[in-house]
Amino acid sequence: MISSSLNLHQITGGVVPEVAARAQIESIIPVIQEALKIAGFDPSHVNGQLAHSMRSQGSNVPAIDAIAVTAEPGLVTSLLVGTETAKWLGYLWNKPVIKVNHIRGHVYANWLERDPKKDPIQFPIVCLSVSGGHNELILLKNHQEWEIIGESQDDAAGEAFDKVARILGLGYPGGPIIEQQAKLFTQMFMNMESNKIVRFPRAWLNQNDSNKWDGTSFNFSFSGLKSEVIREVDRRKSMSDTDRSEIAYAFQDAVCDVLVTKLVGAVKKFQAKEIHIAGGVSANKFFRMKLDESSKSLGLKIRWPEKMVYCTDNAAMIGAAANFAIRSGTGAASEA
């Protein structure tokens, strides 16, 4: 069950916190009620007695053991709507409320839609969670031990996609639109000489001024790339549809080059057994293709969310993160 405020954000060209929070207040209770009905619950009678009764009667409907909610990071106003609603339901139903870190939720999207017996996940894992607000390169030694080995120093990749789409007058959200325009360019000019296509610089954040990554930093920076796009647009003065597609292609290529290079570099350095990607940008097919090409020599399992809906923010991933936190006792998600 999903209620989206995307239409509102398209009007404003991005997420306005107050608008998003008001929309969430209006929809959160109806969405919870409908989701419970779909799962077979009567929302007005979910309590400890019902859970015990359903277990004792062998019902196929699982009992509610806890309530998972996104607690951080994110827009404060929207987080407050969610956490206060979860606390209220926890009190009403006498259930523990499990607070989940948003980024951990994205990471656990790769645990959804998978049979753990037939397809077990092997640690250590290097996971790149890349979305509109956050970029984290994470080393997972097990469910208890996580280490952030790289993160965004300014604009996250998804945020850069949105801003560049706005600069090019392509609309919101930027990720799918930029990908579409870039694909259109490759189809129309696939035989075009590469030296005639604009190429944007990569921010490798090296200790020296090398044009190639020297392996010293796993952090990311995309604000300078955005500035390069602005300069290119200003240089061309009059922008045609072909110009927009070419710039979209060059921008996407620059972002994915940096993401893939540092992800694969981290996998080699930390001797990971699996590569995971998560977050909204993980839905980008060009990114997936580049990662697949660059990691073939490693012979490792690459995972991304099985369904596109699990790439963007969703409740299932938060539930998955809470489930593993409870089972492993990590404290990654804790009672509110």
Image (spheres, rainbow, N blue to C red):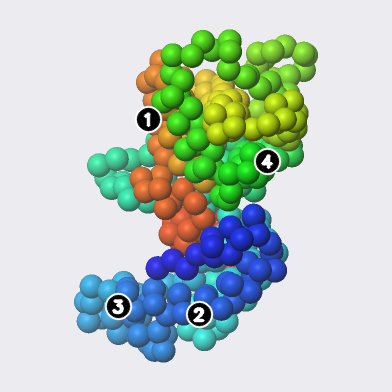
Q: Answer with the quarter of the image where residue 31 lies.
A: bottom left
Closer to viewer: mark 3 or mark 4:
4
How far apart marks 2 and 3 lie (CA) works out to 17 Å
Please tell me which of labels 1 and 2 falls first in the chain: 2
- Hey, what amino acid is under mark 3? Gly
Q: At 78% across and 14% down in the image, what residue appears?
A: 208
Q: Which residue is mark 3?
A: 40
Point out the frontmost of discs 4 and 1: 4
Return the residue at label 2: 29
Foreground of the two, 171 or 255: 171
Regarding mark 3 in the picture, which secondary structure is present there?
A: loop
Q: Which of 111 and 270 lies nearest the eye of the viewer?
A: 111
Q: Position of residue 211 (x, y in %)?
A: 69, 13
Please, what secondary structure does the residue beneath circle 4 have?
Answer: helix
**For numbered disc 2, what is the local secondary structure?**
helix
Q: Residue furthest right?
A: 208
Question: Which x, y percent locates residue 15?
Answer: 65, 58
The alpha-carbon separation of the residues under discs 3 and 4 comes to: 47 Å
Q: Residues within 10 Å of mark 4 (few under 14, many from 20)?
A: some
Of the residues shown, which amino acid type is indicated by label 2? Ile
| Image quadrant in which you'd find residue 168 | top right
> How far separated are the C-alphas under marks 4 and 1?
37 Å
Question: Where 108 sits versus 122, above or below?
Answer: below
Q: Position of residue 335 (x, y in %)?
A: 58, 68
* Residue picked out by circle 1: 301
Check disc 4 and report the residue beneath it: 167
The spot of residue 175 in percent (x, y) is 54, 43
Can you see residue 111? no
For marks 3 and 4, the one nearer the N-term is 3
Tally the marks. 4
Q: Mark 1: which amino acid?
A: Lys
Q: What's the residue at 64%, 32% (across, down)?
A: 239
